[in-house]
Image (cartoon, rainbow, N blue to C red):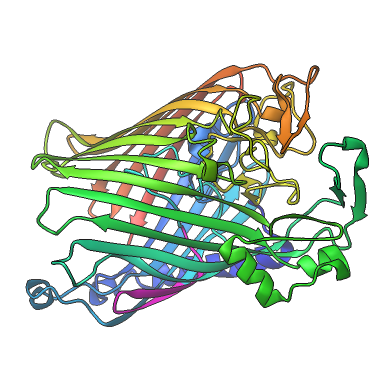
Amino acid sequence: MYLNLKSIILSKKLLLLTISTAFLFTESYAQLRENYKADIEVQAIGTTNGTVPFWMRSNQFGSIPLSGASGSLIGRFSKNYSELTPNEEIYGRERLIDWGFGLEARANGGKTSNLQLIQAYVKAKVSIFELKVGRTKDVMGLNGDTTLSSGNFAVSGNALGMPKVEISIPEYWRIPILDGLFSVKGTFSNSWLGQIKVLDSIVVYPRPDRPDSKLVYPIFDNRPETYLHQKSLYVRLGKKNWKMQLYGGFSHQAQWGSERGVYGSNFKLSPLQTFLYVATGRAYGAPGIPTSKIGNQLGSIDLGIEYDFNNFGLMAYRQFFYDVGALSKLANAADGLTGLAITNKNYEQGRTGVQFKKFLVEYFYSKNQAGYPWSTPTKSGDEDYYNNYYYVKGWSYYRQGIGSPLITLREDAKSGQANRDIEYFLNNRVKAIHLGVEGSINSINLVSKITWSRNYGTFGTSKYGSSTGVIRDENNLNIFKPVNQFSFHLQGDIKVKESLTLGCSTAFDLGKLLNNSSGILVSLKKSF
């Protein structure tokens, strides 16, 4: 979450530029087109027990306040794609070429201080295609509502965005055959993660049935320059006038980079060959290099169904998880994120009385992992979600998990629970029920999240032990004790003037997984 010195200096300049630019546009903004937006937000925060509550820090794209008493200043400035003219809307036309940008920075001050560059990007579109460069707020996966959801398995918006170059079809495009029966969208990108810590040596078992046959090979560069490859493809089945729409697709993520520098001359692939192996998920092995897919690869296969009931819309969805290959044998098919979202199509902003806008319920289950002794055998053993033998901090970026926040980093858990030094995520076997609701009472807009979970640690800290193929590391001493956790969040805001919004949110955590804490945040946002 914290930036190095060079990045901090750049962030300061960008923040000052954001704020000064926003003020410069205050007087003349009426002359700008509506696709330019700018705002400044001031926050006052107080939290207990030296901890920011779970739903105040999770799925915030790294925009997190300090613990204790603190204040924050957030500046945003963006240009969206141009609005269609009435004539374009009538004839269903879209602008062939357009461009935009976004900038968001956050300054925190309290017992310490820091600067965070949340977004800084430019984008351009040509017809249905979009090119985006920079740090952006992105998620990866299919769910009912990215704001209310507990978070996608692959990329939930929990961590800072990674600087990237992305080519995409960002919105579903109806293929102009069969009367628009099929629609598609997808992404293809590469991100720069910086120098990421990897392990210090590689252990290879030439004889899997002989644990004593292990060989140890040194790592030549344990902080290699690392990249992230991402791609996704989603298909929607249903014509424009159909009440029912079906969804299906996948996302694929892979950390990789500098393998020749890490393994030395044993690694024979060129950088281009390495990328092709990464992008296609092809396995590679050589002396001193265990045969496996290159890098840390994970993602989800997603299904969904949506139905229009005139007064409300309903969407049901399911994400199936994959990390090290068990899903290809359906060995971990019990794991997944299952959800149902209901949208009120009669909701009217500002109407008096109590209204609900959207309601979402999810069941998250990651306890199986194909790790039980009776599970379908796989070469890779238990999935051990988000942990990785090669990348020491697994599926994380700047001390935040990239995927679902329901899987717990070691440093976020209460002290005293069983954990292993090789596991950066000490709790990835979870079952949870999550509720999200959005609505209003008169002119007050409200959003709430409520989550209950039962947490079982990892297979490495269970009585079954971790597994790799036929090898099982039995565990009799370092046992994680299953614990419950409850987290609550309520946020409200009201417009006190046309361009001035007052907000307040509160949150608390109770349970034995996270440190018990509570917090309150008051904000004032000026839009230009």
Is 239 situated above or below 513? below
**Which segment is the magenta one?**
122-137
Q: Is residue 146 visible?
A: no
Q: Residue 215 placed where, x, y %?
A: 92, 48
Instruction: Tell whether 333 sits left or right of 279.
Output: left
Residue at (49, 33) in percent of width and height = 335
Residue 488 position within the rendered picture, expressed as x and y whole percent measured from the top left: 44, 26
Of 316 and 79, the residue lying toward us: 316
- Above or below 66: residue 293: below
Does residue 28 appear left or right of residue 288 in this picture? left
Residue 125 lies in the magenta stretch:
yes
Quadrant placement of the C terminus: bottom left
23 with respect to 8 (left or right): left
Q: Give the x, y percent position of residue 269.
A: 74, 72
**Residue at 92% over, 42% down:** 213
Q: How many marks?
A: 0
Residue 516 visible in the current orientation? yes
**Which quadrant of the view contains residue 480?**
top right
Residue 207 position (above or below residue 11): above
Magenta part, dominant SS? strand
Residue 392 x %, y %: 75, 47
Q: Residue at x 67, y 16 (%)?
A: 481
Residue 224 drawn above or below residue 473: below
The magenta stretch spans residue 264: no
Q: Residue furthest bottom?
A: 97
Quadrant in which residue 414 is drawn: top right
Q: Foreground residue, 297 or 157?
A: 297
